[in-house]
Image: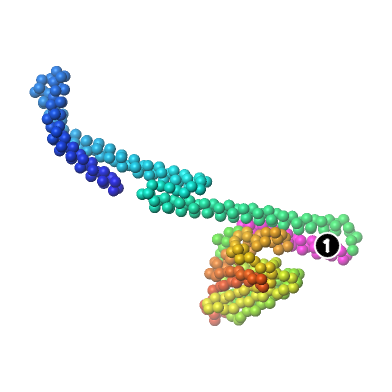
């Protein structure tokens, strides 16, 4: 707009100068004389040639001046717009640079430096998102490979043991019971892996709907520990629950039960045999703090930074014995955060601890509607 205004003013100034200095000045005598001489050469007499000159030029002087101004303005406007067009062409080329795989930075003329900086920021953002998407896709593909292998391992064992039981009807009862028990364990593990596989395909916690109630966290944790007795005993582990009274939070009991169940299963999977898993819950300011502490291998700090990412496993070499789909902790984090809380992990040579913080229900005198849990979400 500024360029257009300047071009208009410049056209008027130069046009006025041409009109005064040339048309009304220098050319006032020579131009009419040249036109009249030209008409005389065509066979007209001087009087007729002078009359035609007056009709054509003198009577329409304003029209010629206006056309001259318009033509002059169009010339200057074209010169101004041609520079803007070059700017747009340069920007178009750099946008093509952004869309390509080139690592060259965006470079524009100095007067377009703000646009150049924004385009460079856009390019870096797109590159980062592309890299993150590729990394996430690679993790998911690796996880599918891991799960495919994990699914095959228990299935092969189940087929082998069932084949033995089918081909040896006279097998001693003790051995038959042993192989039946092993087949059952492998079948249960296969069911867990299939559930994890479905979890990958439908994992979208953005659509989760909370059905909130008042929950007694202490009672929920004690119930969770009781339900896990068989799994703990199978791993030669013990579990102690220490909670304060009246730790009431307002949340979805099924979803929060899933959080605590995931954390306990994670602690069981990575605990040393013969050790204790300690679960504590207490009030801190306006929050309820829940901790799960187990004794196992220390998790390096660089791995702790990614432990709540989707499809991340601390040890990718772990297979069907402990390795999951890498979704349990990610799901736990999502559920805790939509409850307005936070979850964190810490690890030392002595123990690994997961800490959940949830807002405490403000109406502490109100009796909770539900003190336990229904089941897993």
Q: In which quarter of the view is residue 142 placed?
A: bottom right
Q: Which one is in front, 10 or 250?
A: 10
Q: Is residue 83 left or right of residue 161?
A: left
Tell me if residue 308 can be seen. Answer: no
Specify the quadrant that holds the C terminus. bottom right
The spot of residue 103 in percent (x, y) is 51, 48
The magenta segment: 173-202
> Is 194 contained in the magenta span?
yes
Tell me if residue 146 can be seen. Answer: yes
Q: Is residue 22 above or below residue 318?
A: above
Q: In which quarter of the view is residue 46 placed?
A: top left
Q: Is residue 7 above or below residue 290?
A: above
Category of crowding for the residue at label 1, using alpha-carbon neighbours closer than 10 angstroms: few (below 14), some (14–19), many (at least 20):
some
- Residue at the right extreme of this rendering: 170
Q: In which quarter of the view is residue 220 placed?
A: bottom right
Magenta-colored segment: predominant secondary structure: helix
Residue identifier under label 1: 179
The spot of residue 86 in percent (x, y) is 37, 42
The spot of residue 207 in percent (x, y) is 55, 60
Display coloring? rainbow
Please report the residue visible at 57 percent of the width from the left and 61 percent of the height from the top.
205
Please report the residue visible at 70 percent of the width from the left and 61 percent of the height from the top.
318
Q: Is residue 127 above or below residue 351?
A: above
Please report the residue visible at 34 percent of the width from the left and 40 percent of the height from the top.
82
Instruction: Give the SS element for disc 1.
Output: helix
> Is 192 contained in the magenta span?
yes
């Amino acid at each position: 707009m500024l360029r257009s205004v300047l071009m208009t003013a410049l056209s008027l100034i130069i046009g006025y100068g041409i009109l005064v200095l040339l048309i009304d000045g220098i050319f006032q005598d020579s131009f009419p004389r040249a036109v009249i001489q030209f008409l005389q050469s065509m066979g007209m007499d001087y009087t007729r040639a002078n009359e035609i000159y007056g009709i054509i030029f003198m009577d329409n002087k304003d029209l010629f001046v206006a056309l001259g101004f318009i033509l002059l303005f169009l010339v200057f406007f074209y010169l101004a717009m041609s520079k803007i067009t070059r700017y747009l062409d340069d920007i178009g080329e750099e946008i093509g640079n952004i869309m390509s795989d080139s690592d060259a930075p965006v470079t524009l003329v100095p007067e377009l430096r703000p646009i150049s900086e924004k385009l460079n920021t856009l390019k870096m953002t797109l590159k980062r998102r592309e890299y993150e998407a590729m990394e996430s896709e690679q993790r998911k593909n690796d996880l599918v490979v891991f799960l495919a292998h994990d699914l095959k391992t228990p299935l092969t064992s189940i087929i082998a043991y069932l084949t033995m039981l089918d081909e040896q009807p006279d097998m001693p009862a003790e051995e038959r019971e042993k192989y039946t028990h092993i087949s059952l364990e492998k079948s249960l593990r296969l069911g867990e892996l299939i559930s994890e596989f479905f979890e990958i395909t439908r994992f979208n916690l953005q659509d989760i709907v909370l059905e909130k109630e008042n929950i007694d966290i202490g009672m929920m944790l004690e119930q969770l520990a009781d339900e896990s007795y068989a799994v703990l005993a199978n791993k030669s582990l013990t579990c102690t629950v220490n909670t304060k009274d009246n730790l009431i939070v307002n949340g979805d009991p099924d979803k929060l039960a899933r959080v605590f169940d995931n954390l306990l299963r994670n602690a069981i999977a990575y605990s040393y045999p013969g050790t204790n898993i300690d679960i504590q819950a207490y009030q801190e300011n306006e929050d309820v703090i829940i901790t799960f502490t187990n004794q196992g291998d220390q998790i390096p700090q660089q791995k702790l930074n990614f432990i709540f990412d989707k499809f991340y496993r601390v040890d990718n070499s772990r297979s069907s014995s402990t390795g999951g789909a890498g979704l349990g902790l990610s799901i736990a984090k999502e559920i805790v955060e939509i409850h307005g809380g936070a979850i964190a992990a810490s690890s030392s040579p002595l123990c690994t601890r997961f800490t959940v913080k949830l807002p405490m229900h403000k109406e502490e005198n109100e009796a909770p509607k539900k003190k336990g849990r229904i089941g897993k979400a």
